[in-house]
Amino acid sequence: MAKSGKFRWVICALLFFSVAVNYLDRLVIGILKKPLSGQLGWSDSDYGNIAAAFSFAYAFGYLFGGRLTDRLGVKRGLPLFVLCWSAAAMAHGLCGLIGVEDQFRMQYPWFSAAEKGIVWMTLAMPMTAAGFVVARIVLGLAEGGNFPAAIKTVAEWFPIKERALATGWFNTGTNVGAILCPIAVPWIFQRIGWEATFYVTGATGFVWVVAWWLLYDSPEKHRRLSPAELAYIKSGQPAVEATPVKVPWLSLLGYRAVWAYVLAGILAAPAWGFYQFFVPDFLDKSFHLDLQTTGWWTAVFFTIAMVGGVAGGWLAEKLIDRGWSLNAARKVSLLVCALAVVPVFLAPFAGSVWLAVLIVGIAGSAHQGWSANLFSLVSDTMPKEAISSVVGLGGFVAYFTGGFVNGITGHILEKTGSYVVVFTYFSGMYVFSLIAIQLLVPKIKPTT
C-alpha cells in the first residue's frame, strides 16, 4: 500500500517533545547534585534516597498511568500527566524556603525503632532532602504516565512495521532533553540560582500542553489526516470497536509476553535510571571535573545514546522489509543491543574521560535501541486495549526495582567510592533478559 501523507510523524514529533520535557525536568537534580549537596548538606546516601524515591514513585506512575491512559485515552491522559509533572518540577524550587539552619537528623532516643521507620523520610535526613523527596515522589507519579501513553499513541498512529522506528524517534527526545539539561542547567544555575533553575525548566511543560491541544486528535477523527494515510496506518490492524473492550488487569498475567516484558524490565531497565542519576557523579568522581565540564561530557554521553533508539528501530524495520519474520527481526535487534552493552563493565577502568564516556555512551545507545524494540514487543503481541496497561505494569516493576538499585548504589558509593560493582552488574543483564524473552515467547505472533 502506498504511503500517502506524513502527518503521523507530526504526532511522533509531539511525543518526542513530551519526553524531551520529561527528561529535562527529571535530570536537573543529577546535574546539580554537587552544588546542592554542598549547599544543603546532603550525603551520597541522602542523594541515593532522593533518587530512589523518584524511582519508586515513577514505578507506581507507570502502573496507574498506563491504566488511566487506557481509560481516558491519550488525548486527555497525556496532557494531564504533563501538567502535573511540570508543576511538581517547579515545586523543587520551593525547597529553597527551608533554611539550611533548620535541618536536622533524628536523634531522639524516645522514638522506638518502628516509629523511626515511619518518620524516616522526613526526619532521618536533612529537611531540604526530605522536601526534595516529596517533590520527586509527585514528579515520578506524574512522569510515569508519559511512556505508556506514548506507546499507545504509536500503536494507534503507526502500522506494525513502523512502530519500533517511531518509538525510536520519539524516544530520542529523552536524549535531547538529557543533552540540553547538562548544557543549559549549569549556565542557568550560575546566573539565577538553583531554585529559579527548577522554575524555568518546569515551566516548559505548559508550552507543550498548548501545542498538544492544538494539534492532536485520534486518527479516525483528525481533520488533517488524509484517507490514504489513515488506510495505511490501519493496515493490518483490526477495526476499532464501537464500544472499547475492557481488559481486566489480572487477565494480563495470562499472557506469556507480559511476563517476558516484566522480567526484562526487572533485569535491564534499571540501568537507564542509573545512567540518568549517576553518570555525572561517576565522571566527577573519576576525573575531578568542574560542574560545566561535567555537564558537557554528560551531554556527550546522551548524544551517543541518542543514536541507538533510532538505529534499533531502523534495524528492525529494515530486516522486516528484507523479508525477515517479525519474530526474527525483533529478536535479532534485541540481541545486537544486548551484546553492545556488555563492555560497559570496563568504564571504571578507563584512563581518560573521553574513553569512559564512549564506553558508557555505547551502552546507553544500546539501551535505547533495546527499549525501542522491547516497547514494540508489547504492541506486537498485545490487544490494543491493553497496551498502555501492559507498558505500565512492566514499567512499574522495572522502576520499583530501579528504586532499590538507586538506593543501593548510593550506599555502595558511600562504602567503597567505586562504581565497579554497579557497571559489572548491568553489563550482563540484557543478555539474561533476552534469554527470558526467548524462553517465554519463542515466536512473536502479532495480534494487531
Image (spheres, rainbow, N blue to C red):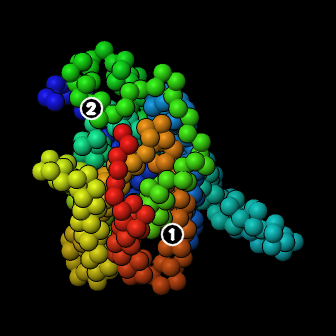
Q: Quadrant of residue 71?
A: top right
User: Which residue is drawn at the image coordinates 69% and 67% (left, top)?
Assistant: 124
Compare residues 416 and 197 and report the one nearer the observer. Answer: 416
**Amino acid type shown at disc 2:** Ser
Which tag, 2 or 1, sits closer to the chain's start? 2
Q: Position of residue 354 (x, y in %)?
A: 20, 71
Question: Residue 373, percent across and down?
Answer: 31, 54
331 relative to 138 in the view: left or right: left
Foreground mark, 2 or 1? 2
Q: Give the spatial CA distance, label 2 vs label 1.
A: 42 Å
Foreground of the two, 207 or 192: 207
Up/down of 115 relative to 99, above or below: below
The crowding category of the residue bearing disc 1, from other C-alpha atoms within 10 Å (few below 14, some 14 to 19, many at least 20), is: many
* Mark 2 neighbour class, 10 Å CA radius: few under 14, some 14 to 19, many 20 or more: some
Q: Which residue is mark 2?
A: 235
Residue receiving disc 1: 405
Q: Is residue 89 above or below residue 413?
A: above
Q: Residue at x 80, y 73 (%)?
A: 113
